[in-house]
Amino acid sequence: MQTLLDALAEIVGPDNLLTGDAVHQRRVDWFTSAPCEAAAIVRPGNTEQLSRVMALCHAARQPVVTHGGLTGVVHGAVAAPSELAISLERMSAIEAIDPVGGTLTVQAGAPLQRVQEAAAEIGMQFPLDLGARGSCTIGGNIATNAGGIRVIRYGMMRQQVLGLEAVLADGRVLSSMNHMLKNNAGFDLKQLFIGSEGTLGIVTRAVLRLQPALPSEQCALVAVPSFAALTTLLNLAPRRIGLSAFEALWSSHYRLMTEESGAHTPPLATDSPFYAILESQGMEAEHDAEQFQALLEEAFEAELITDAVLASSEAQRQAIWAIREDIEVLVRTLKPMFSFDVSLPIPAMEAYVEALEQRLAEAWPGVARLVTFGHLGDGNLHLMITVRDGGAESRRAVERLVYAPLAEIGGSISAEHGIGLEKRDYLSLSRSETEIATMRLLKQALDPHGLLNPGKVLG
């Protein structure tokens, strides 16, 4: 190992090969703050350096784990003491912006928020948005096919990537830096790396698709009397406004985030079974505001909502979104907490949540607690569960209760967070034998020695 580390230091420079305490003081898990246990952290400064690093690791049969912003929650960045971590933190440049073609070329280590700000500077927007925007990186967003709050309008990360560059397990550079919206010249190889969680190659650069900036934003928090009303509102809203986000909060979530924790002042009373955050984007503020107000009035008249608060300033908008995005309050209040990110048909959601809550109560009477919220419009729910025991046995028992019903209703064990180590054993609930066999075939073809993010996704 030391001979390899010495050779890697020559490539990236001694200051960019971290060992000992410099490694262990870094965390690899956002929820638990587990320390990094890798033998070393290698920090290449460009694609050429990473290519040389991987060529040496391939020759030495040295496994590596890629690190981005380390905001994932499925243990996808965990590295064993015998493995090396490859951090792309130095590869964070925004290389080019094309306002005519509507593209932005960026290195994989750039934080999402920086890309959003760069797009805004030329009057455009990069529409992917999630709570970890200040820390998560574009490479990580691509590797996990990130979702977030605007999927309902703009799609997942996959829809935002026109081209990318990746370093393969043997050090070869696969460059597919396409800038065009249409390119049907053979296989679209970039798709292999989007959502593959670093198991097929290490994404180093990307060409991202930008959207026109929509300066007019309307935002409201509404109280909803039933799940049927919630789904009816979801269907009505995009017919009346330029809907960009529709976030559903079960009462368990809204009460905890406001009156129970005291972390946020409740804009609305806490006695409704459901709440929703609606947001629209448009070009004409006055017209958009009228449309938004008309939607709320129509929803009131149809008894789809019982109360509403409309943000009249950016500060009020941020206060509404903070109730949805302040995950630290959930972690602190429910600790030890098990976090789940699932996807399922919208009509099945209410019964699924109710049945899960009942099963948890039966297994851990008086102790279990379920907090539910999510991106209702794209079928994605986040489930935060505590049974006041963070042990492995309890976790496995809770996982079975959460995941098993999904197979029966055509759901997925992962909506947007990936598989990592945490969900690997349940992959067969959401993918067929043939699908998994094809995944293994691709892994064998691109990484025959199993050096890239070993053990993740497929095991």
Image: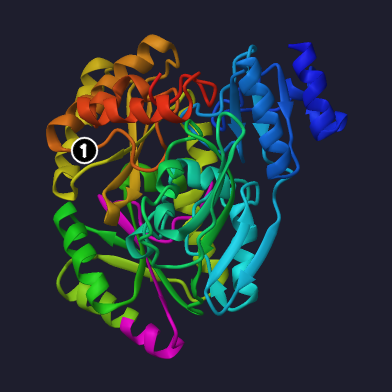
**Res 167 → quadrant:** top right
Badge 1 marks a residue whose secondary structure is loop
Magenta-drawn stretch contains 270: yes
Q: Residue at x 61, y 39 (%)?
A: 68
Q: Is residue 18 visible?
A: no
Q: Residue at x 87, y 28 (%)?
A: 14
Range of residues picked out in magenta: 263-291
Neighbours of disc 1 within 10 Å: few (<14), some (14-19), many (20+): many
Question: Which residue is identified by label 1?
Answer: 411
Magenta-drawn stretch contains 236: no
Point out residue 95 in the picture as x, y percentages from the top left corner: 68, 61
Above-or-below relation of 182 to 379 = below
231 vs 430, nearest the viewer = 430
Above-or-below relation of 114 to 358 = below
40 vs 36, nearest the viewer = 40
Point out residue 341 in the picture as x, y percentages from the top left corner: 36, 37
Q: Is residue 159 visible?
A: yes
63 vs 34, nearest the viewer = 63
In this picture, residue 12 sits left or right of residue 52: right
In this picture, residue 275 sits left or right of residue 18: left
